[in-house]
Amino acid sequence: MLSFNRLMRFRDHNGNIHYGEAPRTALTGQYLVGLSIKPYLGNPLECDGLLSFSEEETTVAEVLSPLSETPIIYGIGLNYRRHAEEAGHPIPSFPVVFTKPPGGRFHMHNSTAWSNGFVDALAGPFEDIPIGKEAKFIDYEGELCIVIGKDVKDLLPSANPFDYILGYTIGNDVSSRYWQIPERSGNQHGYAKSFDKFAPIGPVLCSTKVIPDPSALFLTTKVNGEIRQEAKLDDLIFDIPAIIKHLSRGTTLRKGTIIMTGTPSGVAAGMKPPQWLEDGDTVEVEISNIGMIKNKMKFVT
């Protein structure tokens, strides 16, 4: 039996969906398409990360979200010091928490939603992001994401939070700042960030053995090729153990839960004037040792 290193989920040319091991040299995604690999047998969320290979190779036709579903998506707001400063907010005493709707096969029974390609917030690493008429002042937030590997509640001080992590991936916390304005939001974040497909993640899920120290990673976000965000991930106000301890207070973090750990400075809202995303804009979020996601904003008229 094997435990994964860089887990990818993909569709082959026959429309079948598999999990496989992504080569470290092909993490940008477009290089993953066309690879012939032996897929894993089984789902890592159903066999505690212990997997075995198929005997037959198959070819990658499309790279999908590394998770087919999630019970919930948590977001941590204002978790980089420079981002809190650019937003004009004091450093919080506790993590600022919001949620995005889950996504995946739990909701595919809704034929109308499925036919339109809208399945809650979860989206793939290279999907177009539909922007509805009600979602205005669209912003990007490149983020490191944690995926919980086993249920945890009321984490003990003696426990190691990293024992509960299945792996790390990249996310873009797409946000409609129009609905974050206090008179519309009551100073709540969630509604502005909960539109369909506002949580693209991928392209792979990296295990904790591949990334033993996430604070050493480096994040870059580009809009149409222009660098907007650059940060080493050691600028977090609340680090990963603190986030897991806080979220598990009296609450069960279910296996498969996604936690977006916050975004660094450089978001569109912090620019003068704000540089909101427009129809056709492409956002790339890259994190060292994980890869890159790339999503085009597609405004729906």
Image (tube, rainbow, N blue to C red):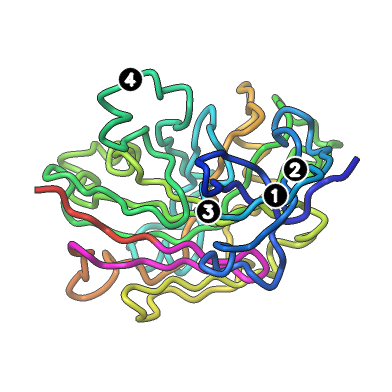
Task: Give the mark nearer the N terminus: 1 vs 3.
Answer: 1
Nearer the observer, 54 or 30: 54
Q: Which residue is mark 4?
A: 110
Quadrant location of the N terminus in the rendered image: top right
Q: Which residue is mark 3?
A: 63
Indicate the position of residue 99 as horizontal and vertical percent values. Answer: 43, 35
Left or right? Give the position of 299 relative to 65. Answer: left
| Mark 1: amino acid | Gly
Residue 215 lies in the magenta-colored region: no
| Mark 2: amino acid | Tyr
Indicate the position of residue 4 as horizontal and vertical percent values. Answer: 78, 49
Specify the label residue 20 is tagged with: 1
The magenta segment: 279-294
Left or right? Give the position of 23 relative to 128. Answer: right
| Mark 3: amino acid | Val
Specify the label residue 40 is tagged with: 2
Label 2 close to label 1 by CB (< 8 Å): yes
Crowding near pointer 1: few (<14 within 10 Å), some, many (20+)?
Answer: many
Q: Residue at the right extreme?
A: 1
Task: Give the mark nearer the N terminus: 2 vs 3.
Answer: 2
Residue 292 lies in the magenta-colored region: yes
Task: Give the mark nearer the N terminus: 1 vs 4.
Answer: 1
Crowding near pointer 2: few (<14 within 10 Å), some, many (20+)?
Answer: many
| Mark 4: amino acid | Asn
Crowding near pointer 4: few (<14 within 10 Å), some, many (20+)?
Answer: few
